[in-house]
Amino acid sequence: MVAVTITKHELGSGGEYIAHVADSDAVGKLTWMEHNGVHYANHTLVPPVIGNRGVAARLVEAMVADARENDFRIRPVCSYVIAAFERHPEWADVQA
């Protein structure tokens, strides 16, 4: 598996997790908006050039880890994040 580094950027009442892939200048993103302590995961984008490497999954995993560490809940809105939560019932503790 290619090395992926995830960074978090807060932007006003929301933000994004950005996936930096070791062998590419392309980045993947998971964007979110915050309201009343809930982070609404509203969009996941992974360009085809870095697709099929588990980048989107790593973005959601980073958000779940962040939620556990910083005590917030996640409301999946994006279809990919909804499906990821369905595949991982162990994430129910952070789902809003």
Image (cartoon, helix red, strand yellow):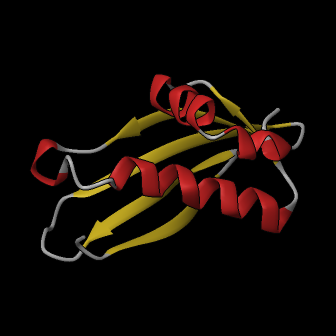
Q: Is residue 29 left or right of residue 3?
A: right
* Residue 40, picture quadrant: top right
27 relative position to 31: left or right: left
In the rendered image, residue 88, in percent from the top left (x then y), is placed at: 62, 41
Residue nearest the observer in this picture, 27 or 51? 51
Q: Is residue 42 visible?
A: yes
Residue 21, percent from left and from top: 25, 69
**In-front residue for pair 43/35:** 43
Between 75 and 13, the residue placed more toward the observer is 75
The residue located at (66%, 38%) in the rendering is: 33
Figure check: 95 above or below 24: above
* Left or right: residue 33 compared with residue 79: right
Residue under the point 85% across and 45% down:
93
Q: Residue 26's x, y, as percent? A: 18, 59
Residue found at x 62% / y 35%: 85
Q: Position of residue 43 (x, y in %)?
A: 47, 33
Q: Quadrant of residue 13?
A: top right
Q: Quadrant of the C terminus?
A: top right
